Image: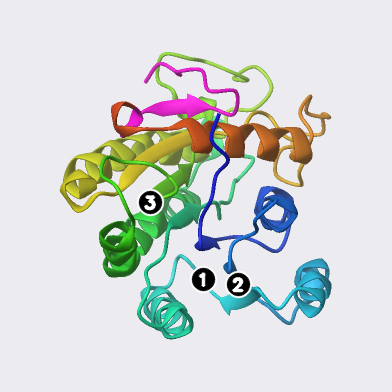
Amino acid sequence: MAELSVRSVLVTGANRGLGLGLVQHFLRMPKPPQWIFAGCRDPKGQRAQELQNLASKHPNIIIIPLEVANPASIKAAAAQVGEHLGGSGLNILINNAGIVKLNALDAETLEDMSEVYTTNTIGPLLMGQAFLPLLKKAAQGSPGSGLSCSRAAMVNISSIVGSISSSFGWEKMHVTSYRCSKAALNMLSKCQSLAYKEHGILCVALHPGWVQTDMGSAGGETPPTTVDDSVQGMLKVLSSLSEKETGAFLDWEGNVIPW
């Protein structure tokens, strides 16, 4: 299996959980990316302390202030990333930032549903639009043809609870707004794959597993999968993707998840 080899990557929600894990694993690669852009809402806040410590030791980590629910923040982030990259493009955009509201179905509200949907679904839409020029540039500047994550890719971190065929975890948590937002994100991933294929950009929705993060443990149970195992698995999957997988919904072990 070919090692994932990229010059640049952007991870949203990079200050903790899976986002921080992705940044750490990119650093550990035999050939780390020249640029690792770590997007987070409050770079100077307490929750970003670990990321700040990492960035102070690794000059290839650039922390980007980024609120994916805010179009102006996304636009500013795209400009900042473009400036750092100079004439080259962005190889991988990983839309990882997400939120959950632990509501039972009868307790869902307009406000909670709107907030979750804005971050989890509209955020990746706007990120894809804003960073499309940089992804296109990376695809054009990469040798060879066909689609791969080493060339240019948009990766949306989804969830099995967004699978309409699955009722995974319903007895434990309804989280209807989260489920709906991820089902919509899956459709967005499919739409992006159709629209951006001609530009040489691979698009995929990935379920990272039920992971031991603040979000994964929010219901009071300990999830079975560690951040390290999930991230290692996802990076292995990304390294093996080709044109035939664009638009797919896969898990961290490479299995196809039913829509």
- For mark 3, what is the residue? 151
Left or right of 101, for residue 127: left
- Which image quarter is the C terminus in? top left
User: At numbered mark 2, what does the secondary structure look like: helix, strand or loop?
Assistant: loop
Of residues 145 and 128, the one drawn nearer to the viewer in this rendering: 145
User: At numbered mark 1, what does the secondary structure look like: helix, strand or loop?
Assistant: loop
Left or right of 98, for residue 16: right
Residue at x-position 44% and y-position 23%: 163
- For mark 2, what is the residue? 41
**Amino acid, disc 3:** Arg
Which is more N-terminal, label 1 or label 3? 1
- For mark 1, what is the residue? 67
Name the magenta segment's main secondary structure. Answer: loop
How many angstroms separate mark 2 from mark 3 (CA)? 28 Å
Which is more N-terminal, label 2 or label 1? 2
In the image, residue 119 lies at what x, y percent? 47, 57
Most extreme residue toward the front is 143
How many angstroms separate mark 3 from mark 1 (CA)? 26 Å
User: At numbered mark 3, what does the secondary structure look like: helix, strand or loop?
Assistant: loop
Asked if disc 1 and disc 2 are in contact, CB closer than 8 Å, the reply is yes
Residue at x-position 29% and y-position 66%: 137
> Mark 2: few, some, or many residues within 10 Å (few <14, many ≥20)?
many
**Amino acid, disc 1:** Glu
In the image, residue 82 lies at what x, y percent? 40, 79
Q: What residue range appears in magenta? A: 245-259
**Residue 39, quarter of the rendered image:** bottom right
